[in-house]
Amino acid sequence: MTPRGIDEYLAALDEPKRATLQTLRQTIRGVIPDAEECISYGLPAFRLEGKVIAGFAAFKNHLAYLPHSGSIFGELADDLAGYESTPGSLHFPIDKPLPKALVKKLIATRLKEVRGRANDKGR
């Protein structure tokens, strides 16, 4: 069953996953305070200007940051050294939140991508 919101998603998790993802949620809110919290593809996400900018998820043995873009990680390869990832998710330990500085870079890169596309369409 798909959660109705981020609070419901987090409430269903065991510790320390819940606390670690709550920290990530607060970090994302601090970077993009105007973003709307939502559920996208059944997972917590943050939408800004009609586009999903960031999200996260809990799995059995790791947590994941979801940039909702396949090109973000390539641009930040040096910053992501030491993390495992797939094209659409950055994996991190269940008991260790991502550093705030890294989350800021991930979001800034995604916003640049989204806003760049919007500017291209306006030409």
Image: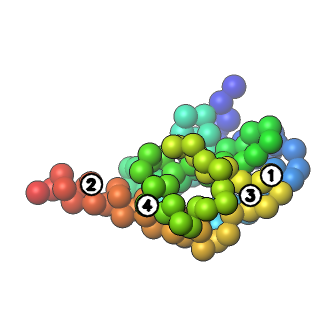
Which comes sooner in the sequence, label 4 or label 2?
4
Q: Which residue is mark 1?
A: 94
The kind of secondary structure element at disc 1 is: loop
Q: Relative to 107, is 20 on the left or the right?
A: right
Kindly report which numbered mark, 1 or 4, lies closer to the viewer in this rendering.
4
Which comes sooner in the sequence, label 2 or label 3?
3
Kindly report which numbered mark, 1 or 2, lies closer to the viewer in this rendering.
1
Q: Which corner quadrant holds the C terminus?
A: bottom left
Q: Amino acid at mark 2?
A: Arg
Q: Nearer the viewer, residue 46 or 63?
A: 63
**Residues under labels 3 and 1: Cα distance?**
12 Å
**Residues under labels 2 and 3: Cα distance?**
30 Å
Q: Amino acid at mark 3?
A: Gln
Q: Amino acid at mark 4?
A: Glu
Which numbered marker is on residue 22? 3
Circle 2 packing at 10 Å, graded few (<14), some (14-19), many (20+), is: few
